[in-house]
Every structure is written in structure tokens, then in C-alpha cells.
Image: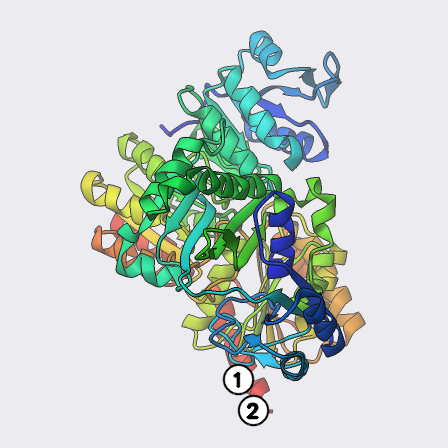
Amino acid sequence: MSVLVDKNTRLLVQGMGKHGTFHAMGCRDYGTKVVGGVTPGKGGGKIEGFPIFNSVHEAVQKTGANCTMIFVPPPGAADAIMEAADAGLPLIVCITEGIPVLDMVKAAEFLKGRTSRLIGPNCPGLISPGEKAKVGILPGHIHMGGPVGVVSRSGTLTYEAVGQLTALGIGQSTCIGIGGDPIIGTNHTSALELFNKDKATKVIVMIGEIGGSAEEDAAAYVKKNVKKPVIGFIAGQTAPPGRRMGHAGAIIAGGKGTAEEKMKAMKAAGITVVRSPADIGAAVAKVLKIKKK
Amino acid sequence: MKIHEYQAKTLLASFGVPVPKGKTAFNADEAVEAAKGLGLPVVLKAQIHAGGRGKGGGVKLARTIEDVESLAKNMLGMMLKTHQTGPEGRKVRRLLVEQGMDLEGSRELYLAIVVDRVSGAPVFMASSQGGMDIEEVAAKDPKAILKEVIDPAVGFQPFQARKLAFGLGLPPEKLAQSVAFMQALYRAFEGTDSSLLEVNPFLILRDGSYFALDAKINLDDNALFRHENLHQLRDLDEEEPLEVEASKYSLNYIKLDGGTVGCMVNGAGLAMATMDIIKLAGGAPANFLDVGGGANAEQIRNAFRILLADPDVKAVLINIFGGILRCDVLAEGVIAAVRDLGVKVPVVIRMKGNKEEEGKKMLRESGLNFLTADAMNEAAKKVVAAASEGARA
């Protein structure tokens, strides 16, 4: 069991350039059914065995795709998201980093009232190890199937947490990287809702970072709705205010969005908050009562 | 990208927003020239990328040409300290010389447009309490700030401007002027791909004329590719030299005050978490450095060079989780950098993931004296110990 992606995922890749192709192969190697790619103007051909289509509409019609991952460069990425939504794809995962924020504002507006769910942009994607389903750029080999749902704004920090879990013999139901931009499709709360409903997910790991108030909102949701244990970590406890720490969304502005505030809200919601990123795995093991090897 | 007040005002004016007449001056002679052209009195405003300039002595009224000359001489080259500059202040290299306004009977208000994360749309904010620190107003009395969420499909509508105008208590007979002023601001926001546009104060003179008396615009870095004319507004003097150097190689480097442990990490989240764990181990990070997801050996080399150019760094921690980035590529880059640069400080390397064993083997066989660690906390402890030893030596 898992959320969003599983054995039935039929994946399309928008933007079959060097990166798109490389990761299309990575997803296929992991076991995901990759049904084709979209590069406008290159339709009819094949790249590494993947049939290429001119439009998302055409690709969906011919392959029955139900999910897409987007590697289209920033100037065209928001357009690619809207094309995927217009074609009715239920799940759109946008990996592209560096999309202008006003483009994302328009894409987010376009998605309202439509049935598609967007993950990202500027995210590593998601993976359900027990289902051999990977959509994105996450390193598959560090994951294993199991009871922990992981949601995080960052890429490598998620890998770090997953690496700790797997080393302790604890598997994951689904790991979702929601992205580090100010405007994203699926936020912490939305991911928590999915994990809360998922029977296979017994424990949730929520990794946040400075900036915005998404973690506080998620904490309020946990307090009200979530009975499953939640382990939390916030990156950027030592970050100075006013500086953007890599991610466009990771900035403490006007005294808001500090790690301390977020950790306080999360603790008040009953979330087990670890101060050190090295303690995430151990904290999960503790609630699952698995002894360290 | 941050830009100067005078640049923001020039942009605003090009979108039809009324701003005071002004000229930039890089020396006292130019300031005097500008004042003569504008007519006295004039206001001299230090141009640095930080707020709170007035309180720090960066805004001065000059009633005579002699005043202009002596004030300009004092201000140019001074280290201006504000709550946003840090304790050492920021060097003033240019002035905006602006026509003095008769503030008798005037009103100062606040207008801003920002991209709001919660609504996922631009929000137009307005407050009748202009001229003050708006964060203070927001904290004390959130209701004093009016907000209109802008539908990105249709843009900022006249009815929204009217709502704000009446909310601010602007004179009804000036409605058309108020709406035009606000709509021009939104056009500037959209037309420049700003992430923040702030007019504080928005000045209404006794005679009823409107001005953007101060202006701040932050441009969206991600959108600069479609604004060829805005690139040139970047002022490298306002940026940390090492940060400028890093940006040339698509590295994300931020210098942190008071730290001794240089860090090199892939991914922003892990880079922040690495800073945190250094602090928990009793040390202090000297920088944030994200080499990105797909760094190559050459980028690693440059990252190392930039890291070590900071004299505060007494030890280095490299923390890499190889997802796309391969550990063997990292090892190759690090070994080459240490050889080329003659690195003197201890280097602790922790790498996990893709091609981890190959990378570790390369480090071992390099003959160089690397410290290695398997877990993050072990790495942090080792590097903090090495840094404090280095500081004593």
C-alpha cells in the first residue's frame, strides 16, 4: 500500500532532453511503467525505447498515461504543467527548478477547479518502494518498502532521513518531496491528509524548513486529525534572517518563518520534534519499538 | 535580486507612477550639480541595499549648496549601519539627490504588492500607517493592514483599488487618481516580474498630489531571463565578493558571521541541516554552501576554493548525499582541489549514496590526510573538534 503512485502508475515524461531521458530510464529501471515522452515537434520517434509524442493529449490518448513528470526548462515549465492538467492527468510531478514565481501563480490558478494534483515544482518527486513505483529523481536503492510515510520540502535531506530509516531496517510506504519553492502544488498538510488515510502508513515523518507557515498549518491539521505518530524536523535552525537559503521559499522574513516558531507549533500539536537531523531514524524506531542494531 | 531605491523609482516612473524628481551622484561635485538642477532644498539619500537608512543617518535634508557639498562628502564612503546591514554597516557609494518636498499637512501611507504563499497569488497591501516599520504595525495591529488578493488571470481590478482607497480614507474626489496610482504599481510589479514591490511612504501632499517617496523592488531571479534590461541593475558592490564569485559557477554560497566550520553540501535542505548539526555539536558554521544536485568535479573544485578563501574557516565539513551526484565524482573533485590549492585546514568528508564505496576508496588511496565519517553527527563532532584545535594553533 502507498499513496499517489503504485503498480498501476503509467508514467509520461515531459521534456525528453538529457535529464528527462536519464531519469525516465531511472524510473523504468526501478520498476515503474514509463509509457512515453513528450517533446513537441519530435513526435513519432523513439528515445531509449520510449515512444515520443507531440502533445500530452496525444500521449494520454495513445498510452493511457495517468501520471507525468516534468523536466521542461524553466521558461516553459508552467506551460507544461497547464498542458498536463488540460489533458486531465490526475498526477503531475514537476521536477524543474527555477520557474518564475508569477508563472507558477498562473499555473496554480489554472489548476484550481481541475482534477489534477501537482507535486512540486523544484522537487525530487515521490516513490513508493513496496510498489516499485518511482516518479522523479530520488535514488531508488536507498529505499525499502514499509510503514513510514515521509514528506519533505527538500531532496537530499529526505534521502538522509530515508537512509537512516533503511539502515535501521525500517521501510517506507511513500516518500514525497513537495519542493522548496514558495508556490507549490501539494503542501505538507495535503500530504499529511494522504498519509493519514493510507492504511499502510503507520508513522509519518515530516521534514520542513524555515520560511512561510506551511509547517504551522500542518501542525494544526495534525493536532485536529492525525492519530498516527508524527516525527518532525525543521532545517535552518541556525539560518540568519533575511537570507534566502538556497530554496526560494527558505527565508526568514519579517521575523516570521523561523525554525523555533515552527518547532514550537509542531510540539504543541503532539509531534515528536527532533533537533538534530541525525536523530530522525532513531525517533521513528522508538515509536515503532525497533531496537537499534 | 535587490536593486537600489533610485533604480526602483526609475522603473516605477516608466510605468506611470509619480516619483519625486531626482538624480544620482557618485561624488560631491555631482551632488552639487544635481542640487543646482533640481533647486533647493534637496534631500540626500544614501543608496544601499538595506532598509532603515533614515534612522542610521543615511537621509539628510540640505537647504544650501554648501550643505549639499559637505553632507555629500560625509555620506559618501561612510559605513551606514541600519538594523538590516549587520554591525559593520554598509559602505555608501552613491547618493540619490532628490527635490525636497513640503511635508506640511501631508499624509504618509503604505502600499505594497507581494506574492503570498498561502493564497498562491499576489496580494496588494495597504495601510494608513506609512513611514513606519510595517512589520511593527502588522505585529501590533494586523487590522491596520488592508489586503486584496489579486486574481492572476485578470490582474488587479479597479474595484479592488477603490476598496483600498476608501479603506485608507483617501479623499473621494481623488478616487480616479488613487486608482490610477495603484494600478500603475501593479503594472510595474507584473511588468518587472517582482517578488516584492513596496512604496513606504506613499506620500500625499497638502495640494493633493501623490508621490512614491521611497520605493523598494525585489526582482524574481528566476524571471530575469526575460528581462534583458533589468540584469544591468545588479550592483555587485552590495554583495559579498565570495557570494558573487560562487554565483559564477552556479553555486549557492552565503557567508555567515562568526563561524569557523566551512561546509560544502549538496541540496539546500541538507545544507541547512548540516549547519544545524554543527551548532548542536558545539561549533559554528562559517557558511551555507549548496553545490546543487548535479555538481561536476570542476564545480566541486571551485566550491572548495571559495570556501577556503574565507579566512575564518578553520576546518571543512563536506557532507554529500549522492542521489544524482555521484560520490566518486565528488571524491575526484575534492582530491584535485586539495592538491591544487594546497589546503592547510583539516577536511572531514562524509558521503553516502550513489558510488559511495568507489568514492571512499579514492579518498583512501589519494595519500591525502582526510578525516572521514559515516554518520552526520560523527562528522559534525570531528569537524568541530578539528576547528577548535585549528583556532588554538
Taking the view exactly as shown, the residue that stands out farthest to the right is B340
Residue B123 vs B364, above or below: the answer is: above
Q: Residue at x 38, y 39 (%)?
A: B148
- In this rendering, would A34 be left or right of B129? right
Q: Quadrant of residue B365?
A: bottom right
Quarter of the image that includes the C terminus of chain B: bottom right
Q: Are marks 2 and 1 on the same chain?
A: yes
Tell me, yes or no, if residue A211 can be seen here. Answer: yes
- Give the residue displayed 58% in from the left and 43% down from the top: B188
Q: Amino acid at mark 2?
A: Arg
User: Label 1 near label 2: C-beta < 8 Å?
Assistant: yes
Pointer 1 residue: B388
Instruction: Give the x, y percent position of residue A236.
Output: 44, 61
Q: Is residue B268 left or right of residue B34?
A: left
In this figure, which residue is indicated by the disc labeled 2?
B392
Q: Amino acid at mark 1?
A: Ser
* Image position, residue B329 (x, y; %): 71, 54
Give the colour scheme of this rendering.
Answer: rainbow
Q: Give how far apart the Cα atoms at labels 2 and 1 are.
A: 6 Å
Whether A233 is drawn above or below B304: the answer is above
Q: State the quadrant of the N terminus of chain B.
A: bottom right
Q: Chain of mark 1?
A: B
Q: Residue at x 32, y 35 (%)?
A: A195
Q: Position of residue B177 (x, y in %)?
A: 48, 41
Residue density around tag 1, few if under 14, some if 14–19, many if 20 or more, within 10 Å: some
Callout 2 environment at 10 Å: few (<14), some (14 to 19), or many (20+)? Answer: few
In this rendering, is residue B158 above or below A166? above
Based on the displayed image, in which of its 4 quarters is residue B46 positioned? bottom right
